[in-house]
Image (cartoon, rainbow, N blue to C red):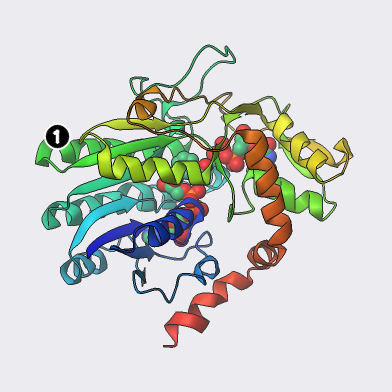
Amino acid sequence: MENILVTGGAGFIGGNFVQYMVEKYPQYHIYNLDLLTYAGDLTKHQQIENKENYSFVHIDIADRQAVGELFERVDFTYVVHFAAESHVDRSITDPEVFIRTNVLGTQVLLDAAKSAEVRKFVHVSTDEVYGELSFDPTTFFTEETPIQPNSPYSASKASSDLLVRAYHETYGLPVNITRCSNNYGPYHFPEKLIPLTISRVLNDQKVPVYGDGKNVRDWLHVLDHCSAIDLVMHSGTVGEVYNIGGHNEMTNLEVVRTIIRALGKTDELIEFVEDRLGHDKRYAIDPTKIEELGWRPVYDFETGIAQTVDWFLENKEWWEKIISGEYQQYFDRQYARK
Ligand code: NAD
Ligand code: TYD
């Protein structure tokens, strides 16, 4: 059996990826390494936590000793690295932890992967490293677009991307970097726009829209992101960057209105608030390179957002536990006391 290390597997995308891999590849043992910060939630893995090909390890990626001991204990074939501080607004108020986790943590993992001579290190990054596009709808980010991050979050991700590139160029570490657009779907943490809107509309609370609501994001269903990473991990050309996006550009106002309509409420719930500092205007991906590798997204935005709204309606208990903070006691109850 081959061992796959997935970092950040208690978070939104890493969590979906862990479940996808555990179900799809019984021949792989999936190790979910996560520090369980505020964004880490293990309750979502109750369906897989007793499976033979799944293990959870409670480690900080910036803890060199703990990461080193794990790599001595387990022989990993692949590392798929999601763990990060991921919320732009938090990076504006408290950038330091973004540098520690996203930059130093990535370097610790790269050292461990290099010593262990893994088959591949897949670094999950973001289109935000490219900075912003104008509103001209004919312009897109390609893999050749210069790196020009604008927020402390995207600057920390860009820094980690450059380290990954350097470990490939200097030491020959087999790597891929993926740069994905905004994700949405099940288990999306309710501080981000889409789940925040759904949870607030369901509670008849105002939805804060930053600035004039005209900023554009390119939305991708999280399961389409998972299939893209699976493909890059197995078939991506070593050393290459792959942009991942599905041509689903929407203004924030369009997204919020779609959700409000789907839930049978009115635009009176929209509240325009002060704009985010350094708010990037527009992101949009040219996915030609990953499509040439054989990837196709399954979800268009209309279907994906309708299913996501249904998922949040059916899983109210999950996001209410997140909002109340109750999810943070699950690890102590299920793991720490054993
Ligand atoms: P998330 O915030 O939901 O989850 C991050 C996970 O990392 C959490 O489980 C957290 O506990 C864990 N973590 C944080 N610091 C850690 C540390 N020091 N050691 C170990 N674990 C730690 O994030 P997400 O939205 O799932 O994003 C995952 C990755 O995908 C990130 O690298 C992010 O930059 C990238 N990405 C996200 C999006 C998006 O739309 N959410 C889009 C493109 C790329
Ligand atoms: P977010 O979900 O934080 O993702 P990112 O900043 O990585 O793109 O935000 C998506 C867009 O929604 C972004 O343009 C900021 C905007 N936004 C709001 O208008 N109101 C909100 O409450 C939040 C969280 C975001």
Q: Quarter of the image containing the C terminus?
A: bottom left
Vertical arrangement, residue 106 with respect to residue 274, above or below:
below
Which three-letter amino acid code belongs to the residue tagged 1? Glu
Residue 99 pos. (x, y %)? 38, 47
Work out which residue is located at the far bottom of the displayed protein and give it.
338
Please tell me in which quarter of the rendered image ligand 2 is found: top right
Q: Is residue 322 left or right of residue 28?
A: right
Return the residue nearer the eye: 328 or 184: 184
Disc 1 is placed on an element classified as helix
Vertical arrangement, residue 124 with respect to residue 135, above or below:
below
* Residue indicated by mark 1: 169
Residue 101 pos. (x, y %)? 37, 53
Q: In this view, does 336 lie to the left or right of 312?
A: left
Q: Quarter of the image containing the N terminus?
A: bottom left
Vertical arrangement, residue 292 with respect to residue 68, above or below:
above
Residue 45 pos. (x, y %)? 50, 68
